[in-house]
Image: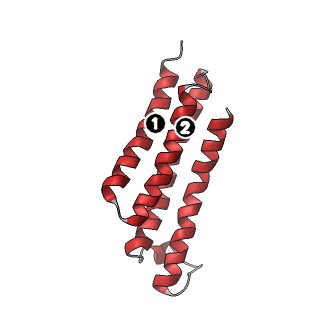
Amino acid sequence: MTVQIICLLIGAVLPYLWFGVSLRYTKVELGSIDLDAPRQQAARLTGAGARARDAQYNAWEALILFGAANVAALVAGVEPTGHWALAAVLWVTARLLHGAFYLAGMSLARGLSFAIGLAMSLWIFGLALTVD
């Protein structure tokens, strides 16, 4: 279970990483950070700043599915050192690349990494469904 817990921790930290990146762009692009209305200010970002904000939102969305898949695998009794661990590591790798590709504006690579991450979450659900 250690691999899965580490992967969940990384997944939980990723949205905050992309938020930090978006703050840098907010400061550069808009001059300051509006602590009274940060979401309204973030909506005004363009280019890489907007992509960093969107990477943050997508990281939260992906984490929900990944978390649910891991709970299902745990409840079903999936062997933690087999395919489940592999899928979790591949999910983290895909999600890290997804954010990097998002920031770089590489939409095709971003889409591919998104699809791989989604497939890993679905694979973990599949493992949970097929436990004997």
Give the class, few, some or many, for how many residues have Cα within 10 Å of label 1's Cα (few <14, many ≥20): many
Query: Where does residue 87 sit, x and y in percent of width and height?
Result: 51, 34
* Quadrant for the C terminus in the image: top right
The reply to whether callout 1 and callout 2 are in contact (CB within 8 Å) is yes
Which class describes the residues within 10 Å of circle 2: few (<14), some (14-19), or many (20+)? many
Q: Amino acid at mark 1?
A: Met
Query: Which is more N-terminal, label 2 or label 1?
Result: 2
* Mark 2: amino acid: Ala
Q: Secondary structure at mark 2?
A: helix
Colouring used for the render: secondary structure
Compare residues 42 and 20 and report the one nearer the observer. 20
Distance from disc 1 to disc 2, alpha carbons, whole Å, reads 7 Å
Residue at which label 2 appears: 88
Instruction: Identify the disc placed on residue 80.
Output: none
**Image position, residue 11 (x, y; %):** 57, 49
Q: Which residue position holds label 1?
A: 120
Residue drawn at x 35%, y 47% is 112
Give percent across and percent down for residue 113.
40, 48
Position of the N terminus, as image quadrant, is top right
For the point 44% across and 33% down, the residue is: 122
Residue at 61% x, 28% y is 74
